Image (cartoon, helix red, strand yellow):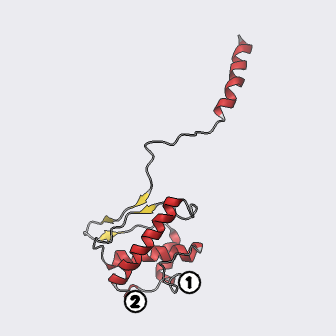
Amino acid sequence: MKNLIILLFFACIPFSCFSQNSLRKDEKKSEMKPSKNEDGEWELTVIDTQFDYFLNAVAKPISQYSESYLKTKNTFLVTEWNSYYNSGKYRNIIESGIDYDPRENYGIKFEYKLYQVFAYVSWKYGLKMSGLSGSDAVR
């Protein structure tokens, strides 16, 4: 009896080593979604300790941009970002898509911060994005 249990144990080991081939049906794509804070302003949270340093020391000030310029740039950059995400390109950098509606009035602070996210990714990781201004993408 003891030998039979040991034999069954060793017979089951190869089956436990197979990888899972089927995808989960309930697995959702990860997306960054803008949200409103308590004051009713749109908010974008960036979880990277160096991003605040980048905003304060490297990025151009908000006064150098107009809201319409940032909205136009962000529309192109979000499209480019999402195409990279959906194609799996730059998987080690782009971990989620961005839910952005160009018809929504997010305000200049949100538009500026979103634009600086793209500039930051270019600055930190060297990711070249065609919609990013050359002076903002300097490393």
Q: Position of residue 117 (x, y in %)?
A: 46, 73
Left or right: residue 122 versus residue 5 is left
Q: For the residue marked with disc 2, what is the amino acid? A: Gln
Cβ atoms at labels 1 and 2 below 8 Å apart: no
Q: Residue 72, located in which quarter of the rendered image?
A: bottom left
Q: Name the residue: 52% across, 85% down.
A: 134
Q: Is residue 105 above or below residue 3?
A: below
Q: Residue furthest right?
A: 3
Q: For the residue marked with disc 1, what is the amino acid? A: Val
135, 120: nearer the viewer: 135
Mark 1: few, some, or many residues within 10 Å (few <14, many ≥20)?
some
Q: Name the residue: 41% across, 67% down.
A: 45
Q: Is residue 43 above or below residue 7?
A: below
Left or right: residue 27 versus residue 124 is left
For residue 130, the mark is none
Give the residue pinned by disc 2.
64
Q: Position of residue 83 (x, y in %)?
A: 48, 64
69, 52: nearer the viewer: 69
Q: Residue 20, located in which quarter of the rendered image?
A: top right
Q: Is residue 82 above or below residue 63?
A: above
For numbered disc 2, what is the local secondary structure? helix
Total number of numbered labels?
A: 2
Q: Is residue 30 above or below residue 125?
A: above
Q: Is residue 53 visible?
A: no
Separation of marks 1 and 2 at Cα, in angstroms? 16 Å
The quarter of the image holding the C terminus is bottom right
Mark 2: few, some, or many residues within 10 Å (few <14, many ≥20)?
few
Q: Position of residue 89 (x, y in %)?
A: 56, 63
For numbered disc 1, what is the local secondary structure? loop
Q: Is residue 71 visible?
A: yes
For residue 138, the mark is 1
Q: Position of residue 116 (x, y in %)?
A: 45, 77
